[in-house]
Structure formats: C-alpha cells, structure tokens
Amino acid sequence: MKSDFKFSNLLGTVYRQGNITFSDDGKQLLSPVGNRVSVFDLINNKSFTFEYEHRKNIAAIDLNKQGTLLISIDEDGRAILVNFKARNVLHHFNFKEKCSAVKFSPDGRLFALASGRFLQIWKTPDVNKDRQFAPFVRYRVHAGHFQDITSLTWSQDSRFILTTSKDLSAKIWSVYSEEKNLAATTFNGHRDYVMGAFFSHDQEKIYTVSKDGAVFVWEFTKRPTDDDEDESENEDEQEEVDISKYSWRITKKHFFYANQSKVKCVTFHPATRLLAVGFTSGEFRLYDLPDFTLIQQLSMGQNPVNTVSVNNTGEWLAFGSSKLGQLLVYEWQSESYILKQQGHFDSTNSLAYSPDGSRVVTASDDGKIKVWDITSGFCLATFEEHTSSVTAVQFAKRGQVMFSSSLDGTVRAWDLIRYRNFRTFTGTERIQFNCLAVDPSGEVVCAGSLDNFDIHVWSVQTGQLLDALSGHEGPVSCLSFSQENSVLASASWDKTIRIWSIFGRSQQVEPLEVYSDVLALSMRPDGKEVAVSTLKGQISIFNIEDAKQVGNIDCRKDIISGRFNEDRFTAKNSERSKFFTTIHYSFDGMAIVAGGNNNSICLYDVPNEVLLKRFIVSRNMALNGTLEFLNSKKMTEAGSLDLIDDAGENSDLEDRIDNSLPGSQKGGDLSTRRMRPEVRVTSVQFSPTANAFAAASTEGLLIYSTNDTILFDPFDLDVDVTPHSTVEALREKQYLNALVMAFRLNEEYLINKVYEAIPIKEIPLVASNIPAIYLPRILKFIGDFAIESQHIEFNLIWIKALLSSSGDYINEHKYLFSTAMRSIQRFIVRVAKDVVNTTTDNKYAYRFLVSTDGSMEDDTADDDEVLLKDDAEEDNEENDVAMESDDEEGWIGFNGKDNKLPLSNENDSSDEEEDEKELP
C-alpha cells in the first residue's frame, strides 16, 4: 500500500472570515477558510485548497489581474506570497501590524495595503535587471487618518487610491509624487464609519457609503462665491480654467433606510454602475448609481453579510457570512444562484465514504448531515431531520442507503437517490445512541448507547426492533460489522470486546479482555482481525477465530498533543490526549490510520507495528493544542497574556459583545463564557478506492490523497516545439513525441496529419504512453474528428486502446472527461445507427447474392449480359465477385430449391413472411 499521502483538499467549510475575491476572468472565486485559502472553479464545478498554512486566521487576500500572484495576510500581519498557477509559496513577510485590506493595482505594478491607520504602497514582486528576485519593496507610505482604515479602492488608471476610515472620513491619495498636491483631499460629512469609497467609470464622480446607510455623491465642481455671476459672463472670454477654484463637493445624498440594520460591506462595479450592499440583518441590495435605483433586494439569512465581491463583467456577485460559514454566488440579471454553500457551524462528529469513493458524508453537533462531492468540494445535500447531535453515519454496501445515529434517540435510514428519510428506528425507551453499525447486506442495523449496556438490532425492511444484545457491563463505545461474514464486533468501557454472530443460532459470546477502556474499534475488511484503541495509548490487534492478541502498537511516543495557552509546560511534558479516539483499517488490512483529541494523524504499518507517516492537523495558533513550546515572555503570575480579554477595547459594539455559549470539549474556562476551540480529530476513514483518506477535524474535513494535484506537461517548457520539428519527429517514426507536440501547438491540420499517419500496429503502444494531461484533449479530438471521418475502424481502434490503457485514470477523474466521453458516445451511436441502417436496407440484395451460385453462368449468360448492359461497371464487378465467392464456398439457396428465388415485386409481404419462416 502507498504511504505518500499529501494534503489535497479541505471540505466541510467554505468561508470563515476576511474578504473573498474573483479572478480576473470571473471563473474562479477565492475564499479564506481559517488559515488556508480555497479556490472554487465556478465553470468546471470543482475546487481545491492551497496546501500552505498561516499561523493565524486570514484577514485579507487578493489576486493580481494577471492571475499569477496571490497574497494573503493573517490577523497578525504576516503575509505569504504564492504563485497562483503553480501553487508554490514564493515568500513570507511580516508587516508587524494588523491589516484590514490589500489590493493589487489594475496595471499590476503595485499593491496597496491598509495597515492600521497607514496606507502603504508596495511594488509587486518582480525580477530586476540583475535577475534577482525582489519580493517586497516598499514604494510609499501615506498617513492622514486618525483611526484604522476600513477599505481601499484603486482608480481604473492606477494613479489614485481612495481610503475610508473609522474616523468618519474618506481620503484620496496619489500614487505619483508630482500629483500629490492635486489629489490631497479629505471627504467629510458622514456621521458613522465610512465603509467604502469608489470612483465612477469616467472617474468624474466619487461615491462614499457609511455604516449608517448614507450614500454621498461627490463631484469636482467650482466653489460657490459672490463673483459667480461676473465669472459666468466672462466664461466665454476665458480659455483657461482656474483649478484652484474647483474642489470635490457633495452633489447628492441618498439613504438606504434599512430600519435598525447597519451596512456591513459594500462594493461597486464602475462599468455597470452596480452598487452591492450587505447589511447586518443578512439582507443584501443592488442599486443603480448615480440615480440610486433599487434593482433587487434579497436575504441570505439572519446573520450579517461580512463581505461582498463582484466579478470583472459585473454579472456575478459573491457574498460571505462568517457566523454560519455561508458562501453565495448570485447572478443578478437572471436572478439565479450560481453557488450556494454552507459548512457545518459546529464540530464534526463522524464521516463515511460512499462505496465508490466519490462522496463523503459528515455528521455534526448541529444536527445536520451533509453529503460532499470529493471532486467538486461542494455540498450536494443537507439532511436536517435529526433534532440533536448526530454521532455516527455509515453506508450500506451498495451506497444508495445511508444510516445515522443521534443523541435524539433515533437511528434514521436515508435514501440517497431521492434524498429523503424513509425509515426511523427507535428503542423501547428514550436513550441516546452514540455508535452505529450496518450489516453489509443492508438488512440489519445495530446501535449502541451510553445510557444502557445493550446493543439494539433493527430490521431495515420492517423497521422493527429485532433484539437487544446483552452482555456488556459498561456503556457500548463502538460497533463494527465484518464486510465478509456479517460478524459484529462491539467494544465497551468494561474493558472487553465481544464478537456476535447476528444470524447464528447460538448467542453465547466469549469476551476478549483488554486491559484498558476501549475508545475506538475497526475490523479488518476480511473479518479475521479486529483492532482497538485504548485509553492507555495502545492499538491492540486481536485474531477473531483464535480469540488471541496478535499485535500491539504503542502510540504514546508518536502523538503530538500540543500545549494550551493556559499550560505552564511544553507539549513534550504534556500527558493530555496521549491516545487515539478513532482508527480505521486500510482496504488491504496492511495499514491503520488513527486520530484523536490532539494535533496528530498517524499512519501505521500493521505487520511491522511501526509508524509510516505522521500528519499535522493544523498549525493555526488560534486553536488550542497547536503550540509545542512555551513562550516564557507571555507568562505572568496571573497566567498567559493570551488569556487576557481585550475585547472591551474594541470600538464597535458588536465586536465587544460575546454571544458564544459554553460547550463540552471546546476549550477555555466555561465560567467566563469565553472559549477557544481545541484542535482534534473526531473521525478518520480510508477511501474505498485506496488512494485517499479523510479526517474530520476542528478545521473541517481534511482530504489526503496520493494523486498529484497538478499534472506535469513534459513539453510545456520546450522551446523546440515547432511544426517543422513535429513533422521531423513523425518522419523519424517517433509517433508519441510527434502526437504530443502537435497537441502542444494546437494546430488542427498538424494533429490530423500525425493522427492518421500512426500505423495501426503502433496504436496500443502510443496510447499507453500518452501523458495524462493530454488524455482529455485526444479523446475530445477523436470524438469530433470521427464524426466526419471515413476511417471508422481506425478510430474505434484508437478509442479501444485509450480506454484499455487509461480506464482507471478516466474513472477516477470523470469530471475531466465528461465532454470528451460525450463526443465519443455520440460517434459510437452514429456508427451503430449507420451500420444497422445499411444492414437493413441491403438485406434482400445480400440474400440474393449469397443464394446465387455458378450454375447460372451456362444457361443464362446471354440473358445476364442483356439485363446488366445498362448497369454501372462497379455494380457488375461486385456481383461477379459475390458469385465467385459463393461458388467457392458452395452456397445453397435459402429456399432449399435450385437457386431459384422469385424476382418479381408482386406479393412482397407474403414472400417476406415465407422467407423468414424458411430461414435456418
């Protein structure tokens, strides 16, 4: 089994905090999820998450217009510069102060940063004349605001920057020093924080929006003076305009009148004059400026809209709400949603892979069950029928039915074709179910509880309680069914494991003694061994047939438990959570993946009982348990400085109010109603496809896979790829190189030439060695080319060779090949239809030809010459060839008579019926 798993995606959460932004082409949406950045491809319906992590949650991100550089800044002002195309980290930098906004200029040469009350302008990282990479070079710093800057906006020509601040003002700054005096202007008049300031498309007007719902329109006009009348008379005489008499003035005032709600975020699209505003009540509105016409008014819930963004064309609007982790992409012209996603807003308790490995189901403390698509990263369905925390989910073997257990005292069965709950199982008394197991046949479902010590067994068909298995002397902590022989294994806090034969006659069970409380259990897929994780940090492996322990793995030395902020010792000296609470066997039974209430996910080799690889769950310092070392300068006699509540110093009332409620295992002192999340892994599971595993953690659903996220193009960087070199490679019979180079050049005539020049005997070899990155393109080419091509068999041989050699890869990446496979299918259907039509139309001609032998040549030679005199020579030759072949094979007429078939057209229907009856 492979062990080179790497982080590939983050599901279960789509937005946490900060701003969201579109790429310049408007096809991709970038969203900060905690200390990572996720990218949603809205056209191809897929997503990915960057592998790099910040030390704290991200506060601001931006992507340059060229789509090559991404900069993200966390809450402490630490920035990471990333190559967006290659997904590689280029540079780390610390701005040493909280940053509220960052924006690249439209021309891409500079980027502006709102750091506290200062506006900093930096040069975009580039390669200088000496071929030395200069990552961060500061260009200019502007100071003028008296409080923190809330937003900044570039002008279309990249010459000016508008900033807004909590000091109730907005300012305009010039990038270039020669225009400094012209642009030094302050916009006052608002009575609350200014949330945004924007240029019109012609840059003749400026719009400012404040938190209390006021929109001011500013224009560069002449100051009103007593000499206005005299000056107006002499306007025609004066050619030069005195700019000193002009200034920015308020020409119009508009108000939202949004009752008690405040403006939370705002953005403006100059080309379409569209103003999008999000409010603290969850409502968002669209206005047309400068007329201030209300276009649409909608709501995305009852929680504040924290960020809004508009794509380059002005068609799509993206909204984010951090309270429940909501992300919305709205097309305002058609009034439809492009994307509507929400993650779990409480901790995830369990996960389960579908049997084909294409989906993952997660269960959470919020009482919801969500179905996630692995490829796209989007939530396909949400079930909300449970009224309390969902503790476990599991699929039946076919994958069309899913089961879940909950603390509300029910076990529910879900139909994943119609997406509905079709069975609800309950016990004889109201108890909370905490574990679940499903028979592979899908006929029986079992659940255990912490309230009593029995295992409840229900029939899926009837929904009735079949039995209550008694024997454990403590709460049942976990259950697992064998996939082969329907044997049930159960573990309990009474330090025993019991093996039950559900369908057997004898119910006598001998317990397997374990010397500690059992926290997790996993049965090997073949049902011969069972592994358990204990409170002492051991993974013990038992042989079910012999009832003996055959292995033991000591995990304590491999676990990084981390230290909390209130700890006065390092993680190395911590005894907290030195055990695993969830384990799972790999498909071949050779490896076990384990996780728990710590910062470690460990992959173990079972036969050798050694650690193969350890994964760090998160490096986010905003979580308890991620730090390893003690920072003595933050420790005082009263405790750590990180524990001091400084929320009372916030200027906003909503930032000072703490609405969080205490809960178990969330970390922090419950008496203070102030909590700090704790890093932990609640569930791990291998994918049935054996190329990935998933872990439900505090940060979300982490997916680790062995697949490369970026396919390498071997010819991408080669300067020698030219049409001449392609033809030369074809002449030298280097067919694979010639084909790949033709696709790299993307010249249709060249692709056709190389494709048809490859000999048939070389096709399987060439098809098996084509790079994976070119597979969708060559299949799409064959599908389109074959529709008009006359070489039916040649194209079919190519299709067969490609599907035979790369079928597994195509099956795992269906989303990449959907268009190509539709073209192939259309070609095959067209060929099949033509073949059937040809066969049907020539049925009687075929019968006539095969029923005629050479005996007619002597008697009717002259007649044949007369009858066929006016026919085409080609038809004459075909008939002769057919008759000669019939002579050689010795055919006899279908009617059993001496080669005589009725040739007249009379009574055709009766002749057809007689012929069909007489066919052998």
Image: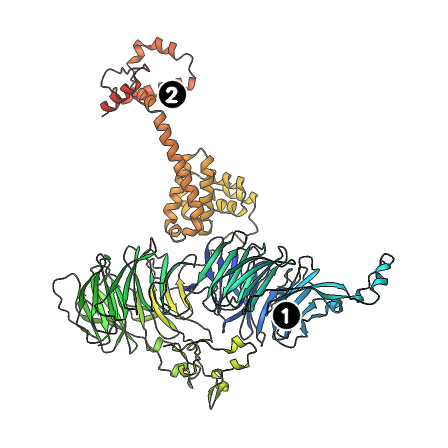
Amino acid type assigned to the residue bearing label 2 in the image: Glu
Marks 1 and 2, how far apart in space?
87 Å
Amino acid type assigned to the residue bearing label 1 in the image: Thr
Dot in front, 1 or 2: 1
Residue 412 figure quarter: bottom left
Dots 1, 2 in contact, CB < 8 A: no
Q: Nearer the viewer, residue 412 or 829?
A: 412
* Disc 2, SS: helix
Q: Quadrant of the C terminus?
A: top left
- In the depicted structure, whether residue 586 falls above or below residue 57: above
Q: Nearer the viewer, residue 356 or 774?
A: 356
The label on residue 558 is none
Q: Quadrant of the N terminus?
A: bottom left
Residue 360 figure quarter: bottom left
Q: Position of residue 735 (x, y in %)?
A: 47, 43
Asked whether residue 218 is in view, the answer is yes
Q: Nearer the viewer, residue 623 or 447?
A: 447
Marked residue nearer the N-terminal end (1 or 2): 1
Q: Position of residue 809 (x, y in %)?
A: 39, 52
Q: Position of residue 572 (x, y in %)?
A: 39, 81
Q: Position of residue 819 (x, y in %)?
A: 45, 46
Residue 590 figure quarter: bottom left
Q: Nearer the viewer, residue 224 or 646?
A: 224
Q: According to the image, what is the colour scheme of the structure?
A: rainbow
Residue matched to label 1:
164
Residue matched to label 2:
878
Asked whether residue 85 is in view, the answer is no
Residue sitting farthest toward the left: 506
Q: Is residue 440 left or right of residue 734?
A: left
Q: Is residue 860 left or right of residue 377?
A: left
Please tell me how many numbered marks the rendered image carries.
Answer: 2
Q: Residues within 10 Å of mark 2 (few under 14, many from 20)?
A: few
